[in-house]
Amino acid sequence: MTGGISKRIYRIQFALLSPEEIRKMSQVKVITADTYDDDGYPIERGLMDLHMGVIEPGLKCATCGGKVDECPGHFGHIELAMPVVHVGFIKEIKTLLDSTCKSCGRIKLTEDEIRSYREKMESISLSTSDPEVIGLMSKRITEEAASRTVCPHCGTQHSKLILDKPTTFREEGIKVTPKEIRERMERIRDDELIFFGLNREVARPEWMILTVLPVPPINLRPSITLETGERSEDDLTHKLVDIIRISQRLRESRDNGSPQLIIEDLWDLLQFHVTTYFDNQTAGIPPARHRSGRALKTLVQRLKGKEGRFRSNLSGKRVNFSARTVISPEPFLSVNEVGVPEKAARELTVPVSVNTFNVEQVRELVARGPEARDEADRYLAGVNYIIRPDGRRIKVTTQNAEENAKRVEPGWTVERQLTEGDIVLFNRQPSLHRMSMMGHTVRILDSQTFRFNLAVCTPYNADFDGDEMNLHIIQKEEARAEARIIMKVQEQIMSPRFGGPIIGGIHDHITAMFLLTHGNPMIPENVGVHMLSYLDLDEMPPVEVHDGKRYYRGRDIFSLILPKGLNLRFSSKLCASAREKCEYEDDPEDKYVTIINGKMTHGTIDEAAIGSFSGVIIDRIFRKYGPEATAKFIDSMTRLGVGFLSIRGFSTGISDYDIPESAIARIEEISNDAIERTEKLVETYRKGELMPSPGRSVEDTLEIEVLSTTGMVRDESGKIASNFLGLNNPSVIMARSGARAKMLNISEVAGMVGQQSVRGGRLNRGYYGRTLPHFKQGDLGATARGFVKSSYMSGLNPLEYFMHSIGGREGLVDIAVRTSRSGYMQRRLINAFEDLKVNEALRVEDTVGAVIQFKYGEDGVDPTKSDKGKTIDVDYHAYDIEHEVA
Amino acid sequence: MMKYLLFKDTKKNMEMLRKDLPARYAVEADLKDCPAGAAYVTNDKKSMIYRLKIESISPYKDQEGLFKKRQTGLKSILELSLVEPVEPLPLSEFKVSGKKIKEFVDFTVADLEKTEFTEKKSYSEDVPKEISEIISIASKKGISIPVSVAEDLAKYRSEMGKDGFNKLLERVYQDLETKQIDPHEAVGIIAAQSIGEPGTQMTMRTFHFAGVREMNVTLGLPRLIEIVDARRIPSTPSMTIYMKPELEKSEEAVLNLVKELENTTIIDVADIVTDIEQMTLSIVPTARKMNERLVKHTDISEALAKVKGITVMHDEEGKEIVIKPQQESFKRLYQLQEQIKVLTIKGIPGIKRAITRKDPSTEAFIIYTQGSNLKEVLEVDQVDSTRTFTNDIIEIANVLGIEAARNAIFNESERTLSEQGLEVDQRHLMLVADMMTFGGNVRAVGRQGISGRKSSVLARAAFEITTKHLLRAGLLGEIDPLTGVAENIIVGQPITLGTGAVNLVYKFNRK
């Protein structure tokens, strides 16, 4: 971490390596296929020559003198006995050979054509840098040239050249050797390269035929020593050994005049080894294998794919200063905080650079040692390492702490342990949106898990069934500032996806607030005071006296956590979702939640008010009072909820789903009725009397009719059951307030589970014409096709249980398929859109400055700040102004 | 209404006539019933490119100074006084007895009914006065407020009184300013995340069309993937056809249109029996199916008349039709059978099925189809071409142009997401639609489309097909300008978006 101005890479140019350049950058000509001698020392001019870098501690690089980690590695080279083609360029070599003359090397076009195409190519390469466009044009030109059989320049007759995949060329059945190809390539004129899409400044066609092979630095192919002392070489080294061996044998055979056949065989073998050295998955040749039978990972395999260099090591990197452990909930933490176990805090450090202003504090810090505790035996941040200006690290131990503290001077850096208030990044994978990684401030807690407020579960999509999360400690001041200002949880309450709060109450928060405000209950003073003790408040709610006892009202207590001056009116979920009649037929005012000047007067707080995704109150507080007030509201709400629920008590059990015998009998009756009706439908179908609905076959019509019959019965039974389950039933409270589950789930428990389905239709597969072997073939009745008439309460019989499992499995398969498909879609979307940005004029541009939109989103409004997508919620402003307290 | 003679001829002939006017031109058709007047000439059976003025028409007689359209079989002579090239006039502008010409027949007499083009009023003219007033009040302060906001404001103008309203306006101005997006914001990444993240919550299944349970349409995640992929043909092409406002409430008109649209082939109404011994094909019509599809026996005969290389052996109302290939071979017989099976009797090719639905709120009928053929459906008279659309984005791009395709991408993705109950801001979808279309053609999100066209070699290599891009970069001597996100991450530099796009220099004040 050196300071000052860092350099920025301006651009990177790609080019082909010429043989001369390969030799020039080479530090050693490798001639021996061996690696180490018997003493374990690298053989000179071997593949592990010290000129190419060092991997063993203690040795020094023969080129730069650097030690391990200092020497970046240097290239060597191998002189190939005979030239071979480069597999990666085989297509280009083919076009070059096809469209040029084999004797004069000119492109097979007339002078006129050359002139006009040259103009076209030049104008294209001026107007665009898109390789696709250039490639298309050059393809047209080369195809035309290739179709000519007589050279217009020297009149040579050409016959068709056949590419025998992967690397052999044949002309009239005779093999064209790489040597000859190279000679032909050399004849191609520099100024005609433009037609092949080649850049004459960086590429010559003959360079695609290799005569010299660069040997990568040893750092790229380190050998590993096993515990047995045996050395194991890298795949690339293995391949290079093969290349050198065959090259040597080929050279010897050639020099002592071996038969042509043997030379050709060796030459082919060399070609094979060089080919697989580049790409071991070339179509048409068997992959080169390791002794154990495993295919070697050569150059292309190293770069390609998800585990390749690009995606695995360059686009994403492993980091230090991070921790990962299981998560658990802690309602007494703020949404902005994260509980870090002491064990992790001791390991994670923040660098503190020592200067004249803080040197005393730092010395004190260092003197504490790495296991610091205060008088009450609580955690205190110590120091793990001190770093001298020359970069040497000194480990601080309890023994040497005092002594090291004295040595610390301005200019040194100290690695301080994590302390309360440090800002850290907290992340849960998959990181699908920016709220998957947010800034939290640290609280050091006992035990072994990371802990956070439940309201933050939604953006991370976390639950506590064993989920793990990652923590990253920020190492630079600049990054810390950004984390505090941009990434902190309170700054991320609004989701850019839909312009509403993504952080808000869940489950118990909603249940608690519902119970606290529904019907404005009277809460005895002692209970109320206990609840309020959880909160940090300056005032008390008004007291009402009934029968000589003192009470608070629920809505008054809730009002305490609302900011002063908030004016709001909206309809609650309870009323908006009530299908038949609203709970408040007798008090229409309670249909709406009304808040005037931070005091709630009417309505019920439920999901629509404080829930994540929908919470109107959270949304409004954020816009009017900002992130900090919103975070405080959510914190208070969590605490109030915990306080209220723990003193009131809230639980649900199987007895909550008890419905009277008469209702059970009625459900039994209608489900039997449905089965009967299905039988009748099947009967009419069998007689051929069923009228098909327009555009459908008779079979489909039957299925649809049966599905709607069974669907109706399910709804019916749900209604019967819920008639006996009112708003005093805990499960109904949860469902109606939006805390958890839907009414449908309750009717499944108390009423009937209903028809099971696969792919939108009734179950029909398994055996030939039947789902299970004890049905008759072609049985279309309700039971045979997965109608479950029992409820979860009464229990499913084995048959129903089986059918239910079939339906359940579809859901599981669906999730498995969906995650991979949507993951890939998102990767493509991100890749396609990552470069877009808004410029100062609110235009959307890409990297080359092409305008995608002239005004972002047509109104230039940030979706995060929009009112649920609308530019401005005028109605709210009007209401707010109307009720504003002067 | 003027009657015009339409025929096909070459450009060369026309130019020859033009040079030597007035001219007499011999043609092969018998035109004694044809009125003199004007004629149009086409060279491609699609649009008329020459207009002729015919002084008189007389039966053919070999005489001096005659221009001949061809050498033999000439029947009439046209006395021409004018031959002039015109702006191509599409065939669809002509009508024969009130109906559009479906297929060009040489020497037709047709009416010309030029489509009236009405200049569409600009949007600002359409805005009611009270709303445009509010917009102008704001623009005096240098603030441009969107029409939708002005609409919302309008109702408070009278309600709140002058002071109150001014206060409200002030609030709106302020709010608008704070809501503006920050420069250098990475809007692309936000859009991609906002669309990708809810993808995990979507269903995979093909659902029944809302309300119309007889038809399946791909929805959910597969449909979304299909949209961003810019597939040539969607897996379930479908059209939503609206009728002209005066017709859309009549059930009868709608049902007639449905019959006209639905593509009926022979196999839909008849069985085909191949007789190998006699080398014949028998088409056995099924009365029930014929009635269902409103197909008459003569319709089949007419359709067969267009098939070349067959002899109709036997054709009688209510009985089977026997045909025989002229060339007697089993191969030909088999080919013919396959050809006859899918022979269109009536309807529009590609429209496999059409279903009507009544919109409960407006009482109007809407037609949904399986299969899509936008171009030909729009040409049907009863169809309201301003509202009718298809879910095939590429087809829209081809028929209506790139701007229409942009809106189609937006509408389709919006519909797909909202059908799943997922809230995604419109701005993200707009950005996706704009990005996919800003190049003038519809480009897919992926390696063949947007990602494959990036200027950075490293970014392309990091996405897919790594080696291909690297090798080619070497040959072309490509230069990576390191302006994007992926490439800067690869080389380990700060990216050029957000806080990475700005530099802050602290000016040290020396004392």
Image (cartoon, helix red, strand yellow):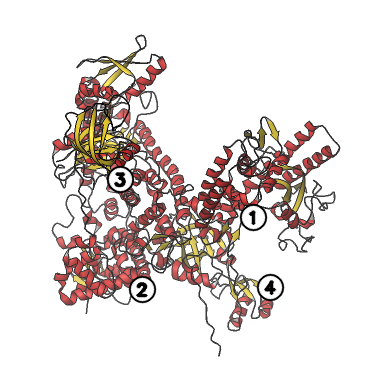
Q: Secondary structure at mark 2?
A: loop
Q: Residue A536: give its label.
A: 2
Chain of the residue where label 1 is placed in the rendered structure = A
Q: Nearer the viewer, mark 2 or mark 1?
A: 1
N-terminal of the two: label 1 or label 4? 1
Q: Is residue B315 above or below residue A565?
A: above
Q: How many C-alpha atoms fall within 10 Å of the one at disc 4: few (<14), some, or many (≥20)? A: few
The numbered dot on residue A399 is 4
Amino acid at pointer 4: Gln
Please, what secondary structure does the residue beneath circle 1 have? loop
Mark closest to the chain's N terminus, 3 or 2: 2
Pointer 2 local density, CA inside 10 Å: few below 14, some 14–19, many at least 20:
few
Q: Position of residue A446 (x, y in %)?
A: 51, 64
**Distance from label 1 to label 3 (Cα)?**
69 Å
Q: Are marks 1 and 4 in contact (CB under 8 Å)?
A: no
Up the image or down, B138 lies above or below A233; here it is: below
For disc 3, the neighbor class at 10 Å (few under 14, some 14 to 19, many from 20) is some
**Left or right: residue A241 compared with residue A489:** right
Regarding residue A280, the answer to whether it shows in the image is: yes
What x and y, as percent, mark residue B381? 20, 40
CA gap between label 2 and label 4 equals 43 Å
Find the residue positioned furthest to the front.
B64
Q: Chain of mark 3?
A: A
Q: Amino acid at mark 2?
A: Asp
Q: Amino acid at mark 3?
A: Asn
Q: Is residue A104 left or right of residue A564?
A: right
The circle drawn on residue A202 is 1
Does the CB distance between marks 3 and 4 fall below 8 Å? Answer: no
User: What amino acid type should be assigned to the residue bearing mark 1?
Assistant: Val
- Which numbered mark, 1 or 3, is in the foreground of this view? 1
Q: Earlier in the sequence, mark 2 or mark 1?
A: 1
| Mark 3 lies on residue | A745
